[in-house]
Image (cartoon, rainbow, N blue to C red):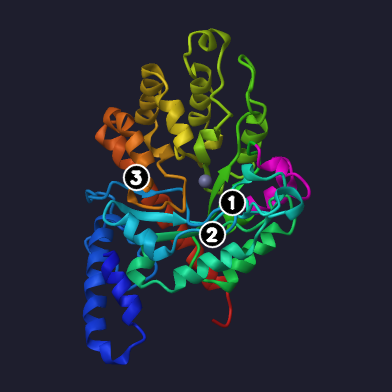
């Protein structure tokens, strides 16, 4: 598929190649849509003619490994892989994928790191700042794809500062300027280890009304929100309630009409699952944490909240001990509608790198019921993002004029 895509690109400006181009294009669409039909829309009609193939039948078995609920095309200095390379990496193993950059740009401060050009937030002491152009960049890439390729992506708006009361105006402006493109917002961060404190300007908070305005707008438009919010401080002590748990629940409860995906189960590299003293002593990982989640999953006021298990750091927690693995599997089997898989890869270099997280989780997949596995890897994605596409397109139809 990659070869064909590249041929299409390289010949597309040559009129003498028109016939060959048409043949290649047809072949490419067939290849893409055969991946997608299993896939994208789980429908018997290949999604070749529309950017919004939202007619869905989740009863069709899917042949792809997963749909990716959490994917970054670019990194902290707005560099990454081309969307054609990403399509080649997805191949016939990934059906659909969210598509976003990273809203934060690491400053290259000569004063701080001299000739060393940092590409990650841990590479420099210089601040991060919000790089709103990321949304235009993602939209332009998406708009250049064929309809069949577009059907595989759910682009997300990320280039806003969630501590700014004007953030919502940015989101609205992006939707208005690029109608027909976006399905959601995020991944954006409120509390994130090492990152939050590095961002120039006012620090984000769960109680900031700017955030309420953003989620109100999600409810109004149908945009899905992917929220990164550490549940706890780094290196928290055992037997303590996670510091951000109550504020997060209150925030989520205030926005019951929005569809919100809480990324990484609220965990981070050094934000580990909450422990009790007893479990800390025996290297048992997270019985307390499991209880907190049980409470959230059975709380009707949080039924609009979903959780992604993306990031290899999260996989490490799940796979730490046979007990932690079993606990995670029990959880996912009991509440399969509420979890999504995603890679959280940032501009992966090749297929091997891209499928690493999915492969890491193999022991977890082996413990899931067929129903839970289907939902977490595929059909929850289709349900949430098809619904978002429908609602957002309807909002745009009403609110975007003169197109
Ligand atoms: Zn991420």
Residue 355's tag is: 3
Q: Label 2: few (<14), some or many (≥20) within 10 Å?
A: some
Find numbered disc 1 in the image and state the secondary structure of the residue it sits on.
loop
Dots 2, 1 in contact, CB < 8 A: yes
Where the C terminus falls, by quadrant? bottom right
Could you tell me if the residues under marks 3 and 2 are in contact, i.e. CB atoms within 8 Å?
no
Residue 351 placed where, x, y %?
Answer: 33, 51
Marks 3/2: CA–CA distance: 20 Å
| Mark identifier at residue 68 | none
Q: Residues within 10 Å of mark 1 (few under 14, many from 20)?
A: some
Q: Quadrant of residue 334?
A: top left
In 3D space, how far apart are the residues under numbered discs 3 and 1 (Cα atoms)? 23 Å
Residue assigned mark 1: 119
Residue drawn 71% across the image and 44% down it:
125
Tell me the CA gap for discs 2 and 1.
Answer: 9 Å
Q: Nearer the viewer, mark 3 or mark 1?
A: 1
Residue drawn 57% across the image and 9% down it: 277
Q: Which residues are magenta?
A: 194-215
Confirm whether the magenta stretch covers residue 205.
yes
Can you give x and y, in whole percent of width and height, for residue 76 in the image? 59, 52
- Residue at label 2? 79
Q: Secondary structure at mark 2?
A: loop
Q: Is residue 15 above or below residue 93?
A: below
Tell me if 45 is positioned left or right of 317 in this view: left
Q: Secondary structure at mark 3?
A: loop
Q: Position of residue 221 (x, y in %)?
A: 56, 60
Q: Which quadrant holds residue 44? A: bottom left
Residue 377, x across and y down, in percent: 34, 43
Looking at the figure, which quarter contains the N terminus? bottom left
Count of marks, rendered view: 3
Q: Which of the two residues, 82 or 364, is positioned nearer the viewer here?
A: 82
Residue 36 lies left or right of residue 328; in this view the side is left
């Amino acid at each position: 598929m990659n070869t064909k895509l590249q041929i299409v690109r390289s010949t597309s400006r040559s009129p003498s190649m028109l016939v060959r181009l048409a043949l290649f294009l047809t072949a490419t669409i067939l290849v893409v849509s055969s991946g997608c039909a299993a896939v994208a829309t789980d429908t018997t009609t290949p999604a070749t003619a529309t950017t919004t193939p939202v007619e869905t039948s989740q009863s069709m078995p899917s042949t792809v490994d997963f749909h990716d609920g959490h994917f970054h095309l670019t990194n902290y200095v707005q560099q990454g892989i081309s969307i054609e390379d990403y399509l080649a990496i997805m191949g016939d193993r990934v059906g659909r994928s969210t598509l976003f950059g990273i809203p934060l740009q690491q400053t290259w401060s000569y004063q701080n790191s001299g000739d060393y050009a940092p590409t990650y937030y841990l590479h420099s002491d210089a601040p991060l700042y919000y790089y709103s152009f990321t949304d235009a960049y993602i939209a332009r890439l998406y708009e250049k794809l064929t309809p069949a390729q577009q059907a595989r992506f759910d682009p997300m708006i990320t280039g806003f500062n969630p501590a700014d009361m004007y953030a919502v105006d940015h989101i609205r402006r992006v939707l208005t300027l690029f109608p027909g493109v976006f399905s959601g917002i995020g991944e954006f961060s409120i509390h994130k280890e090492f990152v939050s404190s590095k961002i120039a300007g006012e620090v984000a908070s769960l109680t900031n009304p700017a955030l309420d305005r953003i989620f109100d707008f999600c409810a109004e438009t149908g945009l899905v929100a992917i929220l990164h919010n550490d549940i706890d401080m780094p290196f928290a002590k055992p037997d303590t309630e996670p510091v951000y748990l109550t504020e997060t629940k209150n925030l989520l409860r205030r926005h019951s009409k929005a569809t919100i995906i809480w990324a990484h189960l609220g965990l981070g590299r050094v934000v580990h699952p909450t422990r009790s003293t007893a479990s800390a002593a025996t290297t048992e990982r997270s019985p307390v944490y499991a209880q907190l989640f049980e409470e959230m999953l059975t709380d009707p006021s949080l039924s609009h909240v979903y959780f992604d298990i993306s990031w290899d750091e999260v996989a490490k927690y799940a796979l730490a001990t046979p007990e932690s693995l079993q606990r995670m599997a029990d959880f996912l089997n009991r509440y399969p509608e509420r979890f999504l898989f995603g890679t959280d890869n940032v501009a992966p270099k090749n297929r091997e790198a891209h499928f690493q997280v999915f492969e890491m989780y193999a022991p977890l997949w082996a413990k899931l019921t067929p129903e839970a596995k289907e939902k977490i890897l595929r059909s929850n994605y289709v349900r949430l993002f098809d619904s978002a596409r429908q609602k957002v397109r309807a909002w745009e139809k009403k609110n975007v004029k003169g197109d």
